Image (cartoon, rainbow, N blue to C red):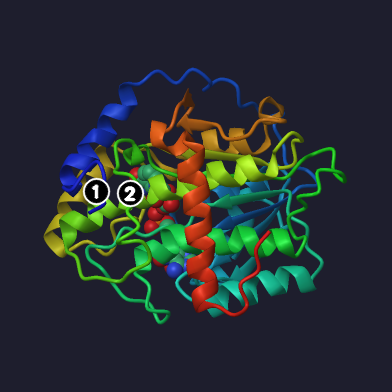
Amino acid sequence: MSHGRFDNPVVAAMAGFLDFFRKQELSDKLTENDRFDGKTCLVTGANSGLGFALAVEIARRGGKVIMACRRQIPEAGEKVKKLSGSSDVRMRYLDLSKIDSIHAFCDGLKKDGIKLDIMILNAGVALPKSRKTESGLDEMFLVNYLANVMLTQLLMTSGVIDISGKNNAFKPRIIVISSDSHQGSSNVDYDEFGRYFEYGTSKAIANYSYFKLVLNTYATELSRKLNNGVFRVGINAICPGPVHTNIIKEAPLVLRATLKSIFSVIFKSPAKACLPVVYMAISPDFEGRTNEYMHMFKPKKMDPKIYIPEEGAKLWDRSLELWKSMDPLARTI
Ligand SMILES: NC(=O)c1ccc[n+]([C@@H]2O[C@H](COP(=O)([O-])OP(=O)(O)OC[C@H]3O[C@@H](n4cnc5c(N)ncnc54)[C@H](OP(=O)(O)O)[C@@H]3O)[C@@H](O)[C@H]2O)c1
């Protein structure tokens, strides 16, 4: 059975606290000269938490922002415009737990002639137990992992993200919002992979970290496949560290109250936590770089299993097979 680093949410939150004492080597590298003028940036899950703060900061730094969300349309976008002083902010409906919605979203970007320079795969859920989606998949598996596979594949095959490596001086960048809690999770378990089964809180916490390991492994394989000899797309992952957001909104009441008090006292604000992500998204320091990982402003290695080519190739094949088996409209690069 797969397992993640933590199976207790309070222990996981306290481990996040220790992150504050880690040296942040690159924290002074992001400056006001790092701007997104002329760049189109997609942020998933941008109505709340880290994604919302990213939308504000990117818009404030001159980017055209597309907020892909399932709620708070248009209110969250109006708030981003107000806080950033930019009107170049659009919201589009995207529910990552619904395969039809993922297709409609990707088709809409294609139809409207949008070309993405930067895509930040930020949306994620931390559920207290298993939950079945209409496709029969487990919601955390779909939203936190497989939907990101679908998004990347559909946007690349349709040319919304240019993977030719030829056209742009600025090569597209994809950023995966991960969690350092992925370190130490188990190997990908192909007996469980894509299979719905009932589980409770401890396994849910463990799965949250484990699905981040699975996502990082896919991102590494995507980078390997696209940048084989020629640099085409920068695909990097980052953990924002402990952030005071709505990530625990579905936790049971008592646990939520406990975690909220930890979050409000010791976790960072989204406005601060988004800065290393902004750095990775736009800084010239990241030009031509791929398959890198930062834990906040600290460059780091991901879990060693993630770099094993055979693991990446197997995950790639199994993920695309699973998707194709349930979706006749699946399109892969
Ligand atoms: N907070 C932390 O300490 C921490 C630490 C490490 C990594 N992260 C990662 O940071 C990312 C952002 O999370 P957050 O902390 O900012 O939490 P958050 O405030 O709960 O934001 C999560 C976002 O994902 C969206 N989302 C969830 N399910 C979705 C779905 N089915 N379709 C579309 N969007 C969906 C949420 O939309 P709704 O508002 O509609 O639910 C929300 O916009 C996540 O990937 C998380 O794993 C967070």
Task: Choose between 159 and 286: the one closer to the eye.
Answer: 159
Q: Residue pushed farthest left?
A: 254
Separation (CA) of disc 1 from disc 2: 6 Å
Residue identified by numbered label 1: 3
Q: How far from the left and from the top, in percent, is residue 50?
A: 46, 49
Tell me the quadrant of the picture where the C terminus can be found: bottom right
Please state if 21 lies on the left or on the right of 41 as rendered: left
- Please name the residue shown 45% across and 72% down the image: 97
- Please name the residue shown 18% across and 48% down the image: 7
Q: How far from the left and from the top, in percent, is residue 216?
A: 47, 44
Residue 50 visible in the displayed image: no
Looking at the rendered structure, the secondary structure element under dot 2 is helix
Residue identified by numbered label 2: 210
Q: How far from the left and from the top, in percent, is residue 186?
A: 29, 44
On residue 245, the disc is none
Name above or below for residue 234 compared with residue 248. Answer: above
Task: Choose between 174 and 42: the one closer to the eye.
Answer: 174
**Quarter holding ligand 1:** bottom left
Mark with earlier residue (1, 2): 1
- Please name the residue shown 55% across and 47% down the image: 54
Please state if 96 lies on the left or on the right of 82 as rendered: left
Q: Are marks 1 and 2 in contact (CB under 8 Å)?
A: yes
The quadrant where residue 286 appears = top right
Q: How far from the left and from the top, in percent, is residue 302?
A: 43, 32
Please state if 232 lies on the left or on the right of 47 as rendered: right
The quadrant where residue 185 appears = top left
Q: Which kind of residue does numbered mark 1 sit on?
A: His
